[in-house]
Image (cartoon, rainbow, N blue to C red):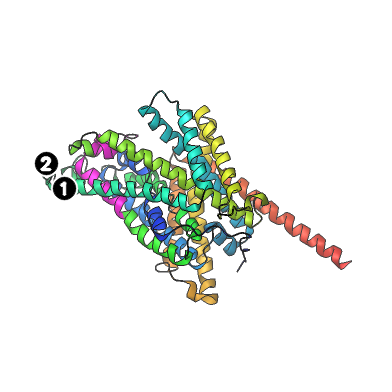
């Protein structure tokens, strides 16, 4: 097994189990669900329930594989470290840098989105000032003890999870006609208006493409687990509790929406949750959902800044990023890594504010399909490392992948299918092509470094032999 060196200076163990559990639950609940789900409903109709079920099952399989490896071999670099152990330095370098780039680019979308909502509340404060405020606040939180990050995320996630649970309860009561001035809705909106699959299975497939990336973000919990008192146990418990509840939240809320609303009434870009709350008579629904989306964006901003800093710190520890980024404060915080991540995040925000439809759009396309690259390497790493762990450290397998290796291969096939479908979709094709280009550049750098290191070793051996 490829050995990954231990950290020169340990990170803090300041995250508690409740932090990780709530991070696992809330880390994936964001604007992609509350607002972006409207686009999926528009293309799939009520069939969006099946789309979310398929995408959610794929995400569950990936998280189970990642959880297995992270419980057996906890590391702040998570899947980047696992890829290096499984395939070599080139794999760890490639997936680590791609994921870091993904987080710092998406960070700009979240900061700008939250700033636009805040600007709507206080128009006298310009968008750029809100962005600056958010970046400064969360940079300060991440530069302090890791427990600060954990507390921020705990309460952010608690609000999001609470909002989803309340929505499901109100929605179910409305479906049954148990709310004031409501009658049971029956199946009219589910089976009418063109049927449950108004656009056939093609619509379901299009829905999968529209929603699969909403499940990105679950990976951060395995990165965070390395900074808990008992990483192996903590990540196993967090993954177990998170994956099926996330599926329940996503699929359940979609079922409520398409049962209570005619699917044609859902407008892409507008929150279907607001439409449902209006439908059942919740006053101020739009403003309530604005607050929830605002919190979701800030939560994702905080989590992405944390995840990107730990990923680049792990890369630096393994010699794949500048050594200066390995420095850790007395409190166990990799402050140079945090500052490096937020610096690029600021650059991304400036590009988003200045050239949202040109320069930044190219950058966003370049990371659009990177999540599938990351997930594919997670699956490949698990297939390779599971056999080694069974031979060398079977006791470390406290969390096991279901039906190994068949479901691991099924997950890989599912991700390949999504990529092929994206290539056939005119709107998604640029993301695949640009992401393939970005992946090719990073991979070329990784292989070039390996070739250079091998050449240097051979030269040194030649000199020693003289």
Residue 184 visible at all: yes
Seen from this angle, which residue lies furthest right? 466
Identified at 35% across, 61% down, the residue is 241
Secondary structure at numbered mark 2: loop
Tell me which label, 2 or 1, sits earlier in the chain.
Answer: 1
The answer to whether mark 2 and mark 1 are in CB contact below 8 A is yes
Quadrant in which the C terminus is drawn: bottom right
> Vertically, is 465 above or below 30?
below
Residue 270 inside the magenta-drawn segment: yes
Identity of the residue drawn at 48% across and 51% down: 372
Residue 448: x percent and y percent? 69, 52
Q: Start and end of the magenta stretch?
A: 248-276
Spot occupied by residue 64 in the image (x, y as percentages of width and height): 42, 62
Label at residue 182: 2
Task: Return the residue nearer the eye: 186 or 68.
Answer: 68
The spot of residue 317 in percent (x, y) is 63, 56
Give the secondary structure at mark 1.
helix
Report which residue position mark 1 lands on: 173
């Amino acid at each position: 097994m490829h050995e990954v060196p231990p950290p020169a200076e340990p990170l803090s163990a300041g995250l508690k189990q409740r932090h990780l559990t709530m991070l696992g639950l809330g880390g994936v609940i964001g604007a992609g669900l509350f607002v972006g789900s409207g686009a999926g409903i528009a293309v799939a109709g009520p069939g969006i329930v099946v789309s979310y079920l398929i995408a959610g099952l794929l995400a569950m399989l990936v998280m189970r594989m990642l959880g297995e490896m992270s419980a057996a071999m906890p590391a702040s670099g998570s899947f980047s470290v696992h890829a290096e152990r499984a395939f070599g330095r080139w794999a760890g370098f490639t997936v680590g840098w791609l994921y870091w780039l993904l987080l710092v680019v998406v960070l700009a979308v979240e900061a700008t989105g939250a700033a636009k909502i805040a600007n709507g509340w206080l128009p006298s404060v310009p968008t750029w000032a809100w962005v600056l405020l958010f970046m400064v606040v969360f940079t300060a939180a991440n530069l302090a003890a890791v427990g600060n990050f954990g507390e921020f995320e705990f309460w952010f996630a608690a609000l999001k999870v609470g909002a989803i649970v309340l929505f499901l309860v109100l929605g179910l009561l409305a479906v049954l006609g148990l709310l004031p001035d409501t009658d049971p809705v029956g199946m009219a909106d589910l089976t009418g208006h063109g049927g449950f699959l108004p656009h056939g299975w093609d619509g379901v497939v299009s829905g999968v493409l529209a929603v699969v990336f909403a499940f990105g973000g679950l990976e951060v919990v395995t990165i965070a687990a390395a900074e808990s008192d008992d990483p192996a146990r903590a990540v196993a418990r967090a993954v177990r509790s998170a994956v099926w509840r996330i599926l329940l939240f996503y699929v359940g809320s979609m079922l409520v929406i398409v049962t209570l609303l005619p699917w044609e009434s859902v407008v892409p870009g507008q929150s279907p949750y607001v439409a449902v709350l209006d439908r059942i008579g919740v006053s101020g629904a739009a403003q309530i959902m604005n607050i929830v989306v605002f919190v979701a964006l800030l939560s994702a901003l905080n989590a992405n800044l944390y995840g990107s800093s730990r990923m680049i710190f792990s890369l630096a520890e393994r010699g794949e990023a500048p050594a200066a980024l390995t420095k850790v404060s007395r409190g166990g915080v990799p402050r140079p890594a945090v500052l490096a991540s937020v610096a690029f995040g600021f650059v991304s925000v400036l590009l988003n504010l200045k050239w949202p439809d040109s320069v930044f759009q190219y950058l966003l396309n370049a990371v659009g399909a990177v999540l599938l690259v990351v997930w594919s390497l997670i699956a490949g790493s698990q297939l390779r490392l599971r056999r080694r762990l069974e031979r060398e450290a079977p006791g470390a397998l406290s969390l096991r992948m279901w039906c190994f290796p068949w479901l691991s291969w099924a997950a890989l096939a599912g991700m390949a299918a999504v990529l092929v479908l994206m290539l056939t979709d005119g709107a998604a094709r640029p993301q695949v092509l640009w992401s393939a280009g970005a992946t090719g550049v990073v991979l070329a750098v990784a292989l070039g470094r390996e070739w250079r290191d091998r050449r240097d070793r051979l030269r040194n051996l030649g000199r020693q032999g003289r």
